[in-house]
Image: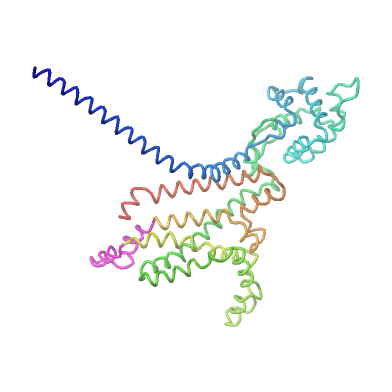
């Protein structure tokens, strides 16, 4: 009897345990669902306003819909073409038919413009050939095309058309690093008069680095002073740091043009003090761009530094000095490692903002100071070449990701964290 009772009690205990586990699982599941419901609106907002636009723009850097859209049948036939001899008669027939059907339509204009970007003069070939279609009675499409332009009888012309008869292309990405396809489809260096983008990207990174270093050299002492002062004084200094945010960037750039020009206040003051005898050229060159960009971006360096330094206790440095460590060595070995997260965050923020700057170099710099963002705006607003604009944007986007990975690796590593502690 006692064994039966023990068995019943054991079964009841097992059932109760299983029921309790099920209840806990359901409660945990409901908690996760509630958290997900709270996060869902923000996730959708970020997806629609941040992730999707960036992904759509980056996709533009490899999009090539013009040729396939205008000549779908010809593109399909050229996809299976070996490229060693002229295409077969069916390809000529399909191309002549589609060329005649799209004559005078936007798809043909878009395809001709796209081909003309890679091979100047090809737009005229397309338009002149389209006007000759459909061929006269008794004339084959092949003969009609070659009669309209002799280049349709060359294998290189069809190879060029076949390379572009794909919905995706690497042409824009190659052009953004001064590369292109040759007539055989190999990747080669761009012509000297077209190879400008590597220099532009190097200039962008170089100017961003210089501005970041200048902001760090100016912002670190100020942030350290703010963190060392009583709250009342620190708050007053913070007001002056944030004061530029109340003025438009365009207004601040215009003010620097007034200050730095040949008859501006800076040159007049230097001449009045006898430091210089003739005005210095401080605008429409790199000096003016650096001055204005450092002034505009300095708060973005100070704020991360101050937020980190405010949490560093001064007792660490005092303890090191009390043990006989000199003040400078105490600062470098004890205080600075703890401030490294602020240095990394401020440097990363300023560098990324510099890479995307457009107004300041455009107004205060010469053509030699224009950065990659200028060409993105140029291709977007003037030439309407979304592919090149997206390709240059992709380069900057990849550079941003690499910088963030380096920041996470160096500043967020356990070694740096242990040193900061």
* Residue sitting nearer the eye, 187 or 70: 70
Rendering coords of residue 114 (x, y %): 73, 38
Asked if 220 appears above or below 33 in the picture, the reply is below
Residue name at image x 36 percent, y 39 percent: 31
Instruction: Tell me which segment is drawn in magenta.
Output: 313-340
What quarter of the picture does the C terminus occupy?
bottom left
Would residue 419 be found to the left or right of residue 387 on screen? left
Q: Is residue 257 above or below residue 92?
A: below
Q: Nearer the viewer, residue 224 or 326?
A: 224
Whole-percent x, y for residue 150 in the image: 84, 30
Q: How many marks?
A: 0
The image quadrant of residue 288 is bottom right
Query: Magenta stretch mostly in which secondary structure?
Result: helix
Indicate yes or no whether the magenta region holds residue 261: no
Q: In the rendered structure, does residue 321 fall within the stretch colored magenta?
A: yes
> Which residue lies most toward the right here?
137
On the image, which quarter does residue 129 sit in? top right
């Amino acid at each position: 009897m006692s064994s039966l009772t023990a068995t019943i009690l054991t079964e009841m205990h097992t059932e109760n345990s299983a029921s309790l586990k099920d209840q806990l699982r359901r409660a945990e599941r409901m908690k996760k669902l509630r958290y997900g419901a709270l996060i869902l609106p923000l996730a959708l907002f970020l997806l629609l306003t941040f992730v999707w636009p960036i992904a759509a723009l980056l996709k533009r850097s490899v999009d090539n819909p013009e040729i396939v859209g205008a000549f779908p049948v010809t593109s399909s036939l050229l996809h299976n073409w070996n490229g060693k001899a002229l295409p077969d008669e069916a390809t000529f027939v399909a191309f002549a038919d589609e060329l005649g059907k799209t004559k005078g339509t936007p798809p043909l204009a878009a395809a001709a413009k796209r081909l003309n970007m890679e091979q100047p003069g090809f737009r005229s070939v397309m338009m002149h050939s389209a006007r000759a279609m459909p061929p006269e009675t008794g004339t084959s499409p092949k003969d009609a095309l070659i009669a309209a332009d002799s280049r349709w009888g060359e294998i290189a012309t069809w190879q060029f058309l076949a390379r572009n008869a794909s919905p995706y292309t690497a042409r824009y990405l190659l052009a953004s690093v001064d590369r292109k396809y040759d007539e055989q489809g190999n990747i080669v260096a761009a012509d000297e008069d077209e190879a400008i983008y590597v220099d532009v990207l190097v200039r962008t990174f170089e100017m961003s680095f210089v501005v970041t270093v200048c902001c760090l050299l100016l912002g670190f002492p100020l942030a350290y002073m703010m963190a060392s002062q009583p709250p009342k004084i620190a708050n007053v200094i913070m007001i002056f740091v944030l004061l530029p945010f109340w003025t438009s960037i365009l207004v601040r750039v215009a003010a620097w043009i007034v200050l730095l020009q040949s008859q501006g206040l800076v040159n007049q003051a230097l001449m009045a003090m006898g430091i210089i005898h003739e005005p210095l050229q401080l605008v429409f060159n790199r000096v003016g761009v650096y001055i204005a960009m450092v002034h505009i971006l300095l708060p973005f360096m100070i704020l991360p530094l101050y937020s980190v330094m405010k949490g560093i206790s001064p007792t660490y440095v005092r303890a090191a000095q009390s043990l006989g460590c000199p003040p400078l060595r105490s600062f470098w070995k004890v205080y600075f490692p703890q401030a490294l997260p602020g240095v990394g965050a401020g440097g990363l923020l300023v560098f990324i903002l510099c890479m995307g700057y457009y107004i300041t170099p455009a107004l205060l710099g010469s053509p030699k100071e224009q950065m990659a963002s200028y060409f993105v705006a140029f291709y977007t607003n003037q030439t309407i070449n979304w592919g090149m604009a997206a390709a240059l944007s992709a380069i900057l986007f990849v550079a941003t990701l690499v910088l963030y990975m380096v920041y996470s690796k160096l500043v967020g590593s356990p070694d740096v964290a242990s040193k900061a502690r």
